[in-house]
Image (cartoon, rainbow, N blue to C red):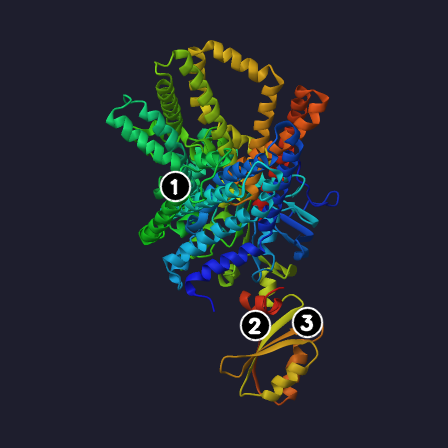
């Protein structure tokens, strides 16, 4: 007979083992490892140490995939019960906080751990291929497991503290991202102080400690030739202890955060009454393009977030300029700031747009408002494009900062435009981005959770695989440009397929 | 592109064309994977009528409503809404209908006014026109005083009113309401029925699915009963309740209990059912009018030595008709 504390845990495992998705993931993993083996074999004549390259590809790809897809997957543990208003029912049963945490989070962790361990027999082949030792394999998996443990428990705490999966995902992303970036930032900060001073030594010591706890730095050490440390370094111990601390924190604060069942329906960025002096930040009367109006104000954050995006972009460029100044030991020139402004504006706009597209229909499905929209006398495509128009005013701040950058660095602007619009590589980048956005949009209506981060993870790994095979095919033909033309066409076709599949899926969801 | 024309029923030359039905459903079928939800359903609804749509859980009511609202495409059969084909002319249909789904689907982060304003704009209404229309629907649904409140802050009954107001904001000719009274308290339910009567007076056709049969019985002009995807009855509600269809129900009051008479009636060919009412010796006899006449029924009772006190045509409740026409148990 099972213990009550493990009841939910057992159930989750049973559900997971019956789900088709579990086996699809394993198949995908096997296919990926097979690809890594082939790529190591094909490039062995060129580079040597085939085993090390095979192994490092698997480890880095696993790390990236865990970081991107794991954030949303783990962060939904308790928050999804809150969104569906079922957490109260769980608490009314015989399950205590520990049983709920174990059932909702540890079962997911175990699922991913089994996925990770399934790699081990294959990656041991790396030893046979040469260039990597058993100690490196064991140390790399210990690093990944410790990081996974940390990621899962940070996400668990965020999931307990936040009311919605989305906010839990954002908090997890910020905490984990902050942890990964803390070491390089601290190293940069140390140079703010005169070398040899107490402050410099203190910050450098913190930076050193953070580097030793950083999984990226640790993987780098493990992959270096001559690695002969044990598997349980500072990173493994510190990550595992931090994971334990976050689990304890989630357990301790569980009752506090879940005592009352709160309304988790969407909240607006700013509720400003029509007669308030701050009404400019509020919601205007609907425009002729009503759907665009709705999505601008209620999905893209409205005017308040327009200001927020502008301030955020400037602040980010400020941080970059500060770090650049520290590294170069001189004042940053106006042209350099201009370049940063253009780069950050484009990058943030691309991220924002992809995020928006992935939420465009997801939120309508989540809050059961899709049928209402589908009843409007327009086709599904018109509906989608009207919604898309809603994000364009939200991107205005990026356009402003971009042109501000162009004014500061006209040469960089000219070169950038030439590089993007005047070369086949630039057009390939545009086609690739469009295809990615369409793919993220499609996944968001197929998967309930974390469509966008999962799309990014799949995209990066898939791109790598595709690029590798095509580069081998075209190497003999000697036409790199031809390869990029073909890739651009492929991505464009893929984008159209994703777009059509998304429209069909949305129509189906409206009728469910 | 020009708006498609509604197709009216064919009329003889020179004769006044009969008003086309608001809903005309012919041999409609639909299936979810391998489960058939609708099986050759055929019925029609007259314009400007309140038509009830009843059936047990899983009978196919919501599927039918979603097809009528153009959210699902029929597997087989033809459906015309206000003369327009729902597949080919779906935009024209959507412009003319208001659908209130069973699951509350409002933008809860908007205020009541914003929500209605958004839908009015989405239906292409001009700014000046919107103001007046919203004022009217708010007054009709008695939500004027709450127009600046966030939808999420309203009670379920009030959200139901907002949902109804949202359906009305583009002045549709036909309202499709799926369980509009579900979860409402008695007062809110009665008020909702009043609003629906008022809407009928305004010339709207209302197609309402509900489990609250007592209220539907008094509200509706006509009714369709559906069970396991098949239409069991569709027509005037009076005909159903007074037995003007294939079967008829009479009340037989006796001076004293007569099990022999009850047994004789039970065995008689053409008698569909006999039920004893309350503690008094009163029986409700339902029989097929094409197999038995009232004289024959009375004769059977008298031949069994029953002392008949009264023999009157009975009027059924909608719930009784519902129970007679639908099968017990959960559909598989």
Quadrant in which residue A269 is drawn? top left
* Label pair 2/1, CB-CB below 8 angstroms: no
Label 3, secondary structure: give it: loop
- Number of numbered discs: 3
Residue located 63% across and 66% down the image: B244
Residue occupying the far right of the picture: B13
Identify the residue under disc 1.
Answer: A234
Quadrant (top left, top right, bottom left, bottom right) of the N terminus of chain B: top right
Q: Badge 2: few (under 14), some or many (20 or more) residues near its Cα, within 10 Å?
A: some
Label 1, secondary structure: give it: helix
Residue B165 percent coordinates (x, y): 45, 44
Do marks 1 and 3 share a subunit? no
Residue occupying the far top of the picture: A411
The relative height of residue B93 versus residue A185 in the rendered view (above or below) is: below
Give the distance between the C-alpha atoms of the residues marked 2 and 3, in whole angstroms.
Answer: 14 Å
Quadrant (top left, top right, bottom left, bottom right) of the C terminus of chain B: bottom right
Residue A173 percent coordinates (x, y): 42, 38
Give the distance between the C-alpha atoms of the residues marked 1 and 3, in whole angstroms.
Answer: 91 Å
Q: Nearer the viewer, mark 2 or mark 1?
A: 1
Using the image, tell me which numbered label, if any, was put on residue B289: 3
Identify the residue under disc 2.
Answer: B314
Residue located 28% across and 26% down the image: A200
Residue located 60% across and 14% down the image: A422
Give the distance between the C-alpha atoms of the residues marked 2 and 1, in whole angstroms.
Answer: 88 Å
Do marks 2 and 1 share a subunit? no
Label 2, secondary structure: give it: loop
């Amino acid at each position: 007979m099972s213990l009550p504390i493990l009841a939910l845990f057992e159930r989750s495992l049973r559900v997971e083992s019956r789900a088709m998705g579990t086996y699809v993931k394993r198949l995908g993993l096997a296919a990926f490892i097979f690809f890594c083996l082939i790529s190591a074999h094909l490039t062995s004549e060129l580079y040597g140490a085939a085993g090390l390259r095979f192994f490092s590809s698997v480890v880095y790809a696993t790390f990236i995939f865990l970081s991107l897809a794991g954030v949303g997957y783990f962060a939904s543990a308790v928050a999804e019960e809150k969104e569906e208003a079922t957490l109260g029912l769980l608490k009314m049963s015989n399950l205590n906080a520990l049983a709920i945490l174990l059932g909702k989070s540890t079962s997911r962790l175990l699922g991913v751990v089994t996925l990770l361990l399934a790699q081990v027999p294959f990656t041991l082949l790396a030893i046979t291929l040469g260039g990597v030792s058993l100690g490196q394999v064991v140390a790399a998996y210990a690093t990944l497991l410790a990081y996974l443990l940390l990621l899962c428990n940070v996400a668990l705490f965020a999931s307990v503290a936040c009311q919605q999966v989305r906010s839990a995902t954002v908090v997890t992303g910020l905490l984990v991202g902050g942890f990964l970036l803390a070491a390089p930032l601290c190293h940069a900060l140390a140079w703010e102080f005169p070398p040899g001073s107490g402050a410099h030594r203190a910050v450098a010591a913190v930076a050193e400690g953070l580097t030793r706890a950083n999984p990226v730095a640790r993987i780098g050490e493990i992959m270096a030739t001559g690695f002969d440390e044990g598997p349980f370094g500072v990173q493994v111990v510190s990550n595992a202890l931090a994971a334990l601390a976050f689990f304890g924190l989630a357990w301790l604060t569980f009752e506090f955060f879940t005592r009352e069942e709160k309304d988790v329906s969407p909240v607006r960025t700013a509720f400003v009454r029509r007669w308030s002096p701050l009404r400019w930040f509020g919601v205007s009367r609907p425009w002729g393009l009503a759907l665009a109006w709705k999505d601008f104000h209620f999905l893209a954050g409205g005017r308040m977030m327009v200001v927020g995006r502008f301030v955020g972009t400037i602040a980010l460029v400020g941080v970059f300029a500060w770090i650049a100044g520290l590294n170069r030991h001189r004042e940053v020139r106006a042209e350099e700031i201009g370049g940063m402004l253009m780069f950050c504006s484009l990058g943030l706009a691309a991220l924002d747009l992809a995020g928006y597209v992935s939420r465009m229909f997801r939120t309508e499905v989540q809050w059961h408002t899709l049928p209402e929209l589908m009843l409007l006398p327009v086709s599904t495509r018109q509906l989608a494009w009207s919604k898309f128009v809603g994000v364009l005013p939200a991107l205005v701040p990026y356009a402003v900062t971009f042109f501000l950058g162009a004014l500061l660095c006209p040469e960089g602007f000219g070169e950038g435009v030439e590089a993007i619009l005047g070369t086949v590589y630039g057009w390939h980048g545009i086609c690739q981005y469009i295809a990615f956005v369409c793919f993220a949009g499609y996944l968001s209506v197929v998967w309930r959770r974390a469509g966008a981060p999962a799309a990014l993870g799949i995209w990066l790994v898939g791109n790598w695989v595709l690029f590798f095979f095509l580069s081998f095919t075209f190497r003999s033909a000697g036409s790199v440009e031809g390869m990029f033309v073909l890739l651009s066409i492929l991505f464009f076709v893929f984008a159209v397929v994703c777009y059509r599949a998304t429209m069909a899926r949305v129509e189906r969801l409206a009728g469910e | 592109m020009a708006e498609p024309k509604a197709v009216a029923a064919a009329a003889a030359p020179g004769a006044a064309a009969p008003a086309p039905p608001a809903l005309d459903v012919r041999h409609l079928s639909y299936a979810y994977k391998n489960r058939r939800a609708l099986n050759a359903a055929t019925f029609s609804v007259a314009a400007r009528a309140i038509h009830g749509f009843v059936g047990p859980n899983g009978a196919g009511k919501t599927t039918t409503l979603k097809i009528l609202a153009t959210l699902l495409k029929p597997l087989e059969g033809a459906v015309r809404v206000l003369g327009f084909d729902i597949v080919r002319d779906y935009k024209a249909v959507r412009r003319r209908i208001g659908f209130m789904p069973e699951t509350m689907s409002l933008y809860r982060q908007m205020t009541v006014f914003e929500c209605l304003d958004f839908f009015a704009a989405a239906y292409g209404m001009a700014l000046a026109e919107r103001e007046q229309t919203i004022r009217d629907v708010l007054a009709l649904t008695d939500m004027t005083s709450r127009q600046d409140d966030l939808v999420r802050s309203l009670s379920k009954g009030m959200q139901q009113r907002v949902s109804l107001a949202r359906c009305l904001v583009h002045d549709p000719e036909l309202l499709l309401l799926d369980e509009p009274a579900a979860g409402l308290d008695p007062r809110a339910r009665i008020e909702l029925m009043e609003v629906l009567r008022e809407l009928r007076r305004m010339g709207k056709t209302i197609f309402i699915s509900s489990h609250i049969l007592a209220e539907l019985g008094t509200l509706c002009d006509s009714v369709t009963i559906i069970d396991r995807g098949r239409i069991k009855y569709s027509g005037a509600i009076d005909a159903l309740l007074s037995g003007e269809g294939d079967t008829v129900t009479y009340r037989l009051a006796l001076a004293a209990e007569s099990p022999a008479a009850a047994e004789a009636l039970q065995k008689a060919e053409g008698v569909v059912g006999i039920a004893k009412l309350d503690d008094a010796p009163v029986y409700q006899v339902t029989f097929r009018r094409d197999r038995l006449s009232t004289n024959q029924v009375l004769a059977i009772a008298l031949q069994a030595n029953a002392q008949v006190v009264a023999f009157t045509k009975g009027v059924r409740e909608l719930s009784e008709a519902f129970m007679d026409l639908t099968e017990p148990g959960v559909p598989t």
